[in-house]
Amino acid sequence: MDSNFLLVLLLLVLGLSLPLLIFLMRTLGTILPYLYATARIRAKEARLLKPEALEELVNTGSVAEIASLLENTEYALAMQGLVLENAESIEQLLERQSADMFSEVASMMPDKVQAVFAFLRQQWDVRNLKALVRGVRAGLSAERIMASLLPYGTLDPEFLKKMAEAAGIEDVLPLLEPTPYGELAQMLPAYEQAASLVPLECALDRVLLESMWRQVEAGGPLQVLQPSFAGRIDALNIKILMRAKRDHLLLSDVEPYLVAGGAASQPLARAFDEVDDVSALASELEGTLYYKPVMDALADYDRAGSLFALEKALDETVLAIGRDTAVKQPYGIAPVLGFLARKDVEVRNIRAIARAKEAGLAPECIHELVLNV
């Protein structure tokens, strides 16, 4: 009798434990492929520049001193054989090192998410195309334009070289027709009317972010990054709308540049033509993560008339969203892309410091340019 009771009890325990065991096995199956990559990412995060290192860069006396300080950081290996004598040369170093880091991190990840990194590599396409059209518009030689491009995107180098050899923007845009950026082929009138590259660069950003948003909404590995991508889209749209309101434009003037997706920027677009100024527009963010940071920065805008403080607050909020996403998803693609985002911020901060130092700005002014992660 006792043995039968124990057998029944054992079977009952096993039956109750089975769902837990299945859950644990599935969880381990999800986590294990990322353990090695996550460990290496955490090691790389520990080597990101600390606030005191950024403070030291801010207080240097020249761009040459910035280059000297970078020799004691993760950038040292990439600096070998280079002469960093101005802010532009430092920017080129940082961009190439950042692209190398992206490729290194992608190589750590499991095969099942390699398609995600191949897709994210399109960010380098956009960076290269912006550099290319700027170079063509400025009349630079094809050799000089190609030297400024990074070999990390999805576009064929020979195709980029053909674009770099074009005589003008009117010859560049038709070449884009068979690419994912084909809609720019029809944007020559917009470019000519604006007499600026702004419509083309905004279109490139829009094509990239809307493509990413469709991938996020479709599910799969990128779905966990929905908050981060929504943040990027919302921040860009809010910036566009605030600039337009400051310049007394109508919504119809900037609507073609707004990116589909996100959520927080949509109420601003709906209220845009009904409010009188930037402050009233900012108040439409109430109930979103951006409301308090933007309202706190409004005093700087009112005092200086510059949107920089508001845009910085938006960027820092997006970073916070990405950080929170990585914390909530400690294994998988979220912490990896969270690290890459922090790396991008580090690069942006160093570039801003170098440019500001070259322009002769005082340390207290340079501090305002630095994003806080």
Image: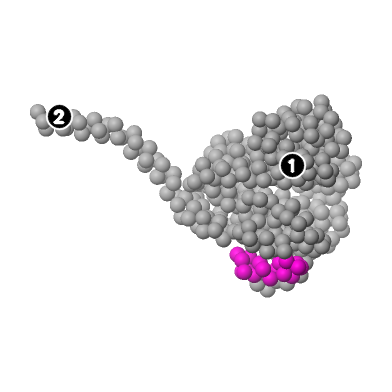
Query: Going by the image, does 239 lie left or right of 335?
Result: right
Foreground label between 2 and 1: 1
User: Residue at left 79%, top 37%?
Assistant: 242
Asked whether 290 or 21 is in front, the reply is 290
Residue 338 is situated, as x and y percent measured from the top left of the image, at 58, 48
In the rendered view, how is the structure colored?
one colour
What span is colored magenta in the figure? 60-78
Quarter of the view holding residue 226: top right
The amino acid marked with disc number 2 is Phe
Q: Is residue 60 visible?
A: yes
Residue 134 is situated, as x and y percent measured from the top left of the image, at 82, 54
Of pointers 2 and 1, the one earlier in the residue sequence? 2
Is 144 a magenta residue?
no
Residue 5, labelled with which disc?
Answer: 2
Asked whether 218 or 296 is in front, the reply is 296
User: Residue at left 71%, top 32%?
Assistant: 285
Position of 12 relative to 342 (above/below): above
- The residue to which callout 1 is attached is 297
Find numbered disc 1 in the image and state the secondary structure of the residue it sits on.
helix
Find numbered disc 2 in the image and state the secondary structure of the residue it sits on.
helix
Query: Going by the image, does 187 lie left or right of 288?
Result: right
The amino acid marked with disc number 1 is Ala
Q: Is residue 203 visible?
A: no
Position of 39 relative to 249 (above/below): below
> Which quadrant, please, contains the N terminus?
top left
